Amino acid sequence: MTYPKNYTVVGAGNGGKAMAAHLALMGKEVTLFNRTFSHIEVIAKRRGIELESFPGGPQGFAVLKKATSDVSEAMENAEVIMVVVPSSGHADVAKRIAPYVHDGQIILLNPGRTFGAIEFDTTLRREGCQANAVVAETETFIYASRSDGPAQARIFRIKEAVPVAALPANRTELVLNAIGDVYPQFIHGIDVLHTGLNNMGAIFHPALTILNAGRIESTHGDFEFYIDGVTPSVGYVLEALDRERVTVASSVGIRARTAQEWLELAYNVQGKDLREAIHNQSGYYGIKAPSTLSHRYIFEDVPMSLVPIASLGNQYGISVRGIDSLIRLACIIHKTDYYRTGRTVDKLGIKDLSIAELNAYVKEGVAHNLA
């Protein structure tokens, strides 16, 4: 088959620069888009990104086709659009690109967090976009990466298996086939309910941060986040939140992985309970806590991960008192209303859908009312 040649990467943060550079080194013609040109000015002048990596990994100077803050220029010839921005920016990206999306394009969110593809698809259609494009999401980001300078990126690790789901799911194979030459690590994620409700960061990140709020503020994060931060009581809370997530998933016909099952699958670690399993994960040792509560573990993971899980649970009569308590604590800490800014079923365009209608939408693309 003929693979797409022209890629546009949206977002020039740590992940976006790493992905753009890697794609370019793999022979793709890559356009890097960032809404603020000053963030990519050096890249534009150098016409590329210097990529460093782990031993045996991709590295070298990656020549880009262009770096631009002009959205129409970025979208014009793109066959695949890789969106690599915090999930709180997905709706804004959808609004920006809506007038320029055209038939046949693949738009992949890296990652979608919880129901990112649903929000993106709904936003495009609410903006009047009628193009026959495919919106998809990954369950997690494929790279562990960082930025070493304005035109430098570093990849520490590339995940071996990353679930991907298109909306609707009957187009997932199309996405996997199109990008299989550059990302053979991407595997079929069943549908976006599976990728969204298996978002493990929703359980680990906000709860650990909020329950260790005093310690984070007094030490500026100078403690081991997953080791010192997961005390027995914190472990009990994590287990309660995880049970609610799994129950919400079950209510819509999804067999979600538990946090302990995920730890065993991802890291081959076990424990008599979640706390012990976390402590048995050697990779968690040495990871410091956030230095401040103004961190994406709250301002991204609460509205974009916990709120949609709670909103879906409330719609189908599932008790989400633990998740709701955590969301409300986050609202108090940040003096905001994450239910107002987050991904509710109303914003996602799935309010009042029956379970059968929701599954028909994510699997077959059966249209529904966006009012």
Image (cartoon, helix red, strand yellow):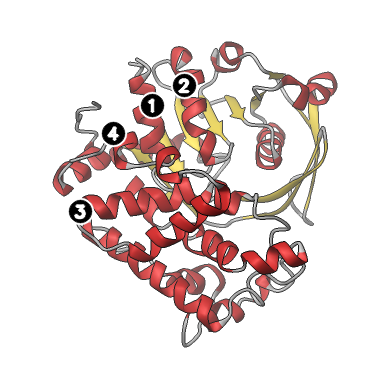
Do the CB atoms of the residues marked 3 and 1 lie less than 8 Å apart?
Answer: no
- In the drawing, what numbered circle is on residue 349? 4
Mark 2 or mark 3: which comes first in sequence? 2
Q: Give the mark nearer the N terminus: 1 vs 4.
A: 1
User: Distance from label 3 to label 1 (Cα)?
Assistant: 23 Å
Is residue 138 among the parts visible in the rendering?
no
Q: Is residue 24 visible?
A: yes
Say if mark 1 contacts mark 4, CB within 8 Å: no
- In primary-sequence order, the first of circles 3 and 1 is 1
Q: Check the image and report above or below for 73 versus 207.
A: above
Q: Toward the viewer: 126 or 159?
A: 126
**Residue linked to disc 3:** 316
Disc 2 target residue: 95
Q: Is residue 207 above or below residue 7?
A: below
Sequence-earlier tag: 4 or 2? 2
Lower sequence index among marks 4 and 3: 3
Q: Dot 1, crowdedness within 10 Å: few (<14), some or many (≥20)?
A: many
Whether tag 2 and tag 3 are in contact, CB under 8 A, the answer is no
The amino acid on which the numbered mark 3 sits, given as a three-letter code, is: Tyr
Q: Gap in Å between the C-alphas at discs 1 and 2?
A: 7 Å
Give amino acid for label 2. Lys
Disc 1 marks which residue?
123
